[in-house]
Amino acid sequence: MLYTEAGQFSTTYRADRRVFRLRQDRIALGTLLAFAVAVVPLIGNDYWFSAILIPFLVLSLAGLGLNLLTGYAGQLSLGSAAFMAAGAFAAYNFNLRIEGLPLLVSFGLGGLVAALLSIVFGLPSLRIKGFYLIVSTLAAQFLIPWVLVKFGWFSNFNASGVITAPPLEIAGYDLSSPGGRYLLTLAVVIALAWLASNIVRSELGRNWMAVRDMDTAAAVIGISLPKAKLLAFGISGFYLGIAGSLWAFTYLGTVEPHGFDLARSFQVLFIIIIGGMGSILGNFLGAAFIVLFPLLLSNLAALLPVGLIDAGQLENIQKMVFGALIIAFLIREPDGLARLWQQFRARARRWPLRY
Amino acid sequence: MTEVVAPTTRAETLLQLDGISLSFGGVKAITDISFAVARGEICALIGPNGAGKSSLLNVINGVYRPQVGSVTFDGEVRRHMRPHHAAQRGIARTFQNIALFKGMTVLDNVLTGRNLKRRSTWVEQALRIGRAEREDDEQRSRAEDVIEFLHIQPWRETVVGKLPYGLQKRVELARALAAEPTLLLLDEPMAGMNAAEKRDMSRFIVDINREYGTTVVLIEHDIGVVMGISDHVVVLDYGRKIADGPPEEVRRNAEVIAAYLGTRH
Amino acid sequence: MDFFFEVLIGGLLSGVMYSLVAIGFVLIYKASGVFNFAQGALVLFAALTFVSLVERGVAFWLAFGITMAAMLLLALGVERLVLRPLANRSHITLFMATLGLAYIIEGAAQALWGAQVHGLELGIEDVPLEVGGLFVSQFDLFAAGTAATLVLVLSLLFNKTRIGLSLRAVADDTLAAQAVGIRLPRVWTAVWAVAGLVALITGLLWGARLGVQFSLSLVVLKALPVLIIGGFSSVGGAIAGGLIVGASEKLAEIYVGPLVDGGIENWFPYILATLFLLVRPAGLFGERAIERV
């Protein structure tokens, strides 16, 4: 009964456009954000920051990037990791070669480079449809890391192509502790998630969904398909590029191009399938699932007698369970965890009535 | 071919097709069709299945490109239209097999219809700065007018894919109307409807025509409806035009009777 | 010039190996509209099962039979647990389901048989043969012969048998096929089983060359550009696409590779296929459907 909308009316179009029309929702979101910003840094330990929270946030952002392209604009991509790599290596080089460039600006420039590359590999989408597109995105997936390995300049001639994070410093504050890296990641993710939620509810977001649902009709009502598609590739690439920078600098600290292989692209795709295509919240749910599930599985295995399941076997089992989950989600809940959350919310609104 | 000459008392011509021929890999869909639609009229395209009616609509708004002929719209002569250009010039349409954006709500579908009326850029909208917010209100208010006009307010927030067929047809009309078109192309707006629904839809079409002065070209099989609401009827058969004129004249045309009863060609 | 032709012929023959994977794809795509990413996992599963049986002392043909039976069971399972619940869903959904399927099959294959590399000896030596003054690998010739036989058998199956007729009907119009009484589950199972057979043969040939190991499942990535160039729905296209990719890849490796210090074979076919798509969006032999609205 706490969660009731009685007496809350939108009296202006502006009020009606809000993501959270219910006061309770807004309070809950505010509390969650305040908790994440103010309380978590105080109570979290290094393990939580480095092994769970930071990868969760970065993967959420990567999922968000792919979701804008695939979930909203309907363009399938298997090259997410390549654009993450492009973003990370570009940000690294901007930071390395331009004296005194602020960290966030190098992230942004890295994102722009990834966006440009994403647009280039998205160009075939103007001619071809559906899963023919996976070929050009796979071309990116194989070509970009190869270029990064092949030409030493990108990794400042490191023998094995590894790049190392620059000092994480913003306005004189040192953010290289686990808690600092967490806060930096969180700030970037919150800002970009806010932006994404604006975009998908704007004209551009509607145009994307129109292209996804029926491109002929979209063209007939005057939506420019090339513009809508290429903007989707560009903005998605920007998000993935920034996610790549965060992955390299705030999560791992050092990274090589092979860290952004096809398996990583699949991981990002699975996040949006499990979390929910065409949903902002879904990326966070999906990423949480992808990060927590292997931990849960290995903890379960640890409960069994020693030697019953070795590490290799655990990996195989994890793979099978993931595969099965993907299929199960596609069959039972194609809109993913986000949809389950919506249903739960709808029920909470009616509680204690059943319908 | 007995050409029924259109009366000369008509107002200015809005749309003129000249010698349009269209074929798909050797199969002729339309052969040498010419006709004119006057500004402000309701023009019906009728003819048996496969006569080329839908193909003709597709030529008018540029989904198909005819091999021969030209399209003149609002004084501009073109070899063929392009969908985007047609939309910009004020041509909107609905489809025979509803082409709505099924994953979006009714309101969002109607709003997409107004995409050409936006002035603010996507960056302004994403950051919610400048004219974006004010313009959002404006667009919403115009969309609400259309939604009210077609009586679909109760379903505003419903995802279109979940609506019944008849309502989907109405939402599609709303989306087309939201663009404030000069010319509205309707491909079988009443297909699959019962008598009451047809009556409602006919009412809407006539109201649109009278209130907004929108010129309408529609395809319809129900001869009763066609004769009741249209000012001008064009009859096609096997990709050719066999009659063109006011409804009462076309009704008496021998070739039309033959085509409809299937006696001979 | 002789060297050029040797490279060209070597490339064409290695292209046959790509075509084999692509044929498995085409079969499933034609019959069910599914873009089967799990074809590579099927290859791995088949080869690993076969080689593990042989290593345990099972005779060649018996191992072949048992593996084929396993592939049939797999086909039954896929139809029942994946295809049937997902009938009438979008192509992209089905594609993603096969990604999940690939994970399951790869995981299962390795959980059952382990992750180490197995050698596989088919009794054909990989030695150069001299044909008309040019040196050609004997193994490649054998692979090409196998592929030709396979294509012949498949085309007989499609054009001369009842199940082939049902299959073509389903490929053309699923609803209409059901309406005339064709049982979809059966056709789907049959086609996945045939794709399983193709995977087994592919797995044996690739396994004999590379060793039977996890990387076999990555041959799927070699087949994708082949499909794009040949078109998804034509067995002939798969062959032609394989030959084009094989030949151009080898030529590029020899003549372009040194300029950039090698290692281009992973991405070259994709760039080639992407460029190809820009010119012919439906592939070499694929048909472009007229869009009706």
Image (cartoon, coloured by chain):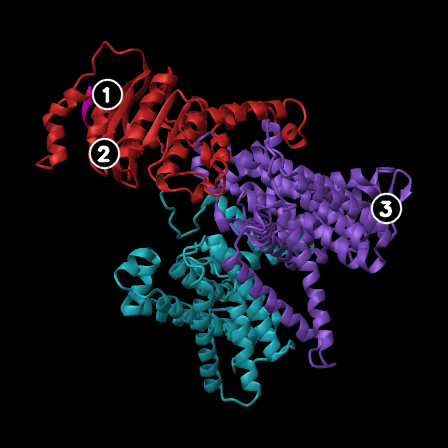
Does dot 2 land on a helix, a strand or a loop? loop
Q: Amino acid at mark 3?
A: Leu
Would you say A20 lies left or right of C13 here? right
**Chain that appears purple:** A
- Per the rendering, the mark at residue B241 is none
Q: Which residues are magenta?
A: B242-246
Please tell me if label 3 and label 1 are on a single chain: no
Q: Nearer the viewer, residue C91 or C25?
A: C91
**Rendered location of residue C62, percent (x, y):** 46, 86
Q: Residues within 10 Å of mark 3 (few under 14, many from 20)?
A: many
Instruction: Tell me the residue that label 2 is attached to.
Output: B221
Does dot 3 land on a helix, a strand or a loop? loop
Labels 3, 1: front one: 1
**Rendered location of residue A86, percent (x, y):** 70, 47
Q: Which chain is indicated by disc 2?
A: B
CA separation, marks 2 and 1?
15 Å
Indicate yes or no whether the magenta region holds residue C109.
no
- Is mark 3 in CB contact (under 8 Å) with mark 1? no
Would you say B189 lies left or right of A347 here? left
**Rendered location of residue C136, percent (x, y):** 52, 70
Residue at the bottom extreme, as displayed: C57
Predominant SS of the magenta segment: strand
Instruction: Tell me the residue that label 1 is attached to.
Output: B232
Q: Which chain is indicated by disc 3?
A: A
Q: Amino acid at mark 1?
A: His
**Chain that appears red:** B
- Per the rendering, the mark at residue A168 is 3
Tell me what residue is drawn at x 29 percent, y 27 percent.
B202
* Colour chain C appears in: cyan
Asked if residue A48 is positioned above or below residue B94 in the image, the reply reads below
> Looking at the image, can residue C225 be seen?
yes
